[in-house]
Structures are given as structure tokens and as C-alpha cells.
Amino acid sequence: MFGKLLLLFTATLAAAQPVVVRTSTLIDGKGHVLKNKELIIDGGKIIRIADAKQKPTIDLTGLTVMPGWIDTHIHATWYFNKEGRYEAGGRGSKSTPQQAALYAAANLYATLMGGFTTVQSVGAELDGDLRDRIAADTLAGPRLLTSLRAVNENTGDPAAIRAYVQKMKADGADLVKIFATASIRDGGKMTMTAEQLNAACGEAKLQGLRSIVHAHSSDGARASVMAGCTAIEHGTFLDDATLELMAQHGVYFDPNFLVLHNYLDNKAKFLGIGNYTEEGFAAMEKGLPLVAEVLKRARKHQVKVVLGTDGVAGAHGRNAEEFIYRVQDGGDRAMDALTSGMSLAAESLGMGGQIGSIAEGMQADLVAVSGDPLANITAVRHVAFVMKGGKVYRYAR
Ligand SMILES: [Zn+2]
């Protein structure tokens, strides 16, 4: 008995040995490049950063090391079924619920392997279980935050919306997702009233939840800002006055390239389902230059731009392509695009003190790529190492 206990104690001590990660180039997540540092990792956290001198446990010399990337907008449960058609599980799916759950788990595994250690899924009921399995480390995936469901114009009057948000909180949602406007495939016009938005974002705030708003048009976005919502997604048609208002109110902005490219690249897998019509695809094609233009104007107005992909079926595991589109098409400086997916994204999730930067006391979430993404942003495709909470999930040099 005593021997067993002693053995257990020794094993615990061995597991608790600090890990020394040596780096030659490190981007800290807040716009700085550090050279020749070692990170001391213990209990899943970075406990010390110093000039490299110890014998490393893990040697990442020659790679570019960054905080694990953060995607503030995915749909973890969307997948292509065995016939190569888009599904999101649930009613009308040809896949069984068990198959749908496995597709979702595979999406999250791919996302983690692609360098993303935290995602916000907006959102489906299954997300809550995926989040909990990942947090228990019985499933490999990024830290997951979820809205579980979404509020839209049909949720009801302001009182019904408040009750709906309270139920979301009670059921374990981490945030509230709101549709203030139609899809870009349906013109993107404002669909919720200001009163409905006030109820949704106001109640979210009362419940201690952030509110993430799908809004393409300026009127929908402005009403959301005035309602105290946290972030605007897409924003394809935002005018300068709305961007300025967002900057003044500290509202985060998440324009997305990958989602439109992904739809166009996988057109046959979506076409004919719901609003994925020829007209819808034409609207998305027209949207691409608008996203590039609104991102450039958002930077001019110093809006807090975060990285989200609106990652749907076909995009999971390729989330890092968003960095590339933002630099190559959206005119972002590479460092700005990276910071959007590191410290700024973390701040937008209310997790700036835990993730999104490499500093003492932060979670040991690291991604390392071969090449220098500041010189050539496509280096983000070459992920060689992924650590989350001090545990290594990928290491292939
Ligand atoms: Zn979305």
C-alpha cells in the first residue's frame, strides 16, 4: 500500500518537472519579436521566459514560435457527408447523429493540428459536449467556447429574447450569437429591430455573457453597437461612420475571407441546399473585394480587428488561410494579421490574461511554423509544433 502510494507520489513529481522550450525566433502575440529565449513551462503554464541557456526539453530552434492561434468564429459541427454534400447534423441529415458527432470531433482535431488552440463555435447544441470532452482532455481539440444556439428576428419580442438568453446561460453557453441581418446570400439587410437587439445584448450583459453579432449592413451593425454588443461578424457593407462608431465603442470586428473562398472552392458540395443558390454564390463572389475594402477601412479607423474564419464544412484545419487572405488581399501587415489571431482575439473572448500571448503566467499554448510568417505569411501553412496547456499535440520537424 505504502509502496504504491510512494510510486504514485514519485510519478506525480516526475510529471511536474518543468519543461524547457528553446526558441530562436518568438512572436509574443502583442507585436514583438524576441530572439533566443527559453520558456519554462510548469503546470500547463509559462512560468518564466529567459535568455536561452539551459538544456532544452524541447528544441524549437529554427522555427518561428507563436502563441497558439485563436479563431473567434467557426461552426464546429458542419461537415461534408459521405456523398460529399454539406450537412450540419440534425434534421434532414443523411448521417446518423453518431456520424455527425464524429465529423465534428474530426473537425476540431484538424483545427488543433492546424495550429489553433482556441476557437469560438457559434454554435450548435453538440458544441457543449465537445467543449467539455476537450476540456477533460479525452478528445484532442482546441479550447472551445460556444453559444450553443443563436438569437434571430424570429426568437420573439424583447421579453421572449431575454428569456431565451437566460436559458442559454443556464444551459452553459459561453456567449450569445445574434443574427442582426440576413445572410450575404440574401442581401444582408437588417432583420432584427433595435428593440430586439437591445434585449439580446442587454440581457447577455446582465448574464455576464459576450454578444457576437452577424451583421453585413451598416444599420444592423450600428443598432448592435448602440445595444452594447461585443463584436460584429462579417460587416461586408459597413460604411465609414459605422466603423468609426465601432472604434469609439471598442466593438471588435471580424471580417472573414476564408468562408467566402471556401464556399466558392466547394460550390458543388453546397449548391442547391437552402440559400446556396446560383444567386447566392454570385453574391458571395461580389462580396470578396468588399471584405478586402472594409478591412482596409477598419484599419484606418483603428477598429479592433480580430481573426475569425466563419469556418464551415471544408474549412476546418485550414483556418490559418485567413491570415494569408488578410495580408495578401486585405492589405494587413503580417504582424497585424497575426496579432488579430493572438492577443486581440484573446482579449475579445475576455481571455487576454490567459491566452493569446507568450508571457509569464499565460497558458502554455504554442504553435511553431517553419519559415518566417512576417516575411512570407504563407509560412502559417507549415505548422511543425502545437502545444496546448503544456501538452504537445503535434511535433513533426
Ligand atoms: Zn458563422
Image (cartoon, rainbow, N blue to C red):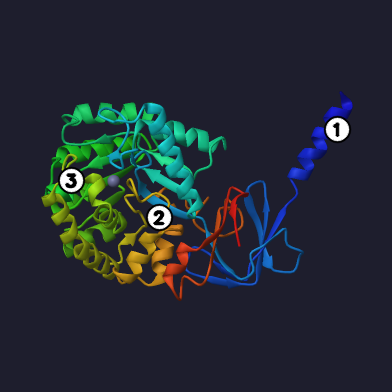
Give x and y (percent) for residue 320. 41, 59
Residue under the point 67% across and 54% down: 41
Residue under the point 17% across and 39% down: 274
The number of callouts visible is: 3
Q: Secondary structure at mark 3?
A: loop
Q: Which residue is mark 1?
A: 6
Q: Which residue is mark 2?
A: 318
Give whichever of discs 3 and 2 has the lower sequence position. 3
Which residue is farthest top?
1
- Look at discs 1 and 2 and give the one toward the viewer: 2
Q: Which residue is mark 3?
A: 276
In the rendered image of this protein, does residue 205 appear above or below residue 292? Answer: above
Spatial separation of the CA atoms under disc 3 and disc 1: 62 Å
Graded by Cα atoms within 10 Å as few (under 14), some (14 to 19) or many (20 or more), the crowding at tag 1 reads few
Q: Quadrant of residue 287?
A: bottom left
Give x and y (percent) for residue 297. 24, 68
- Between residues 269 and 361, which one lies in front from this camera angle? 269
Q: Amino acid at mark 1?
A: Leu
Q: Amino acid at mark 2?
A: Arg
Give residue 186's mark. none
- Between residues 62 and 49, which one lies in front from this camera angle? 62
Picture quarter with the C terminus: bottom right
Q: Is residue 287 visible?
A: yes
| Badge 1 vs badge 2, beta-carbon distance below 8 Å | no
Q: Secondary structure at mark 2?
A: loop
Spatial separation of the CA atoms under disc 1 and disc 2: 46 Å
Give whichever of discs 3 and 1 has the lower sequence position. 1
Instruction: Please state if 156 lies on the left or on the right of 333 as rendered.
Output: left
Q: Amino acid at mark 3?
A: Tyr
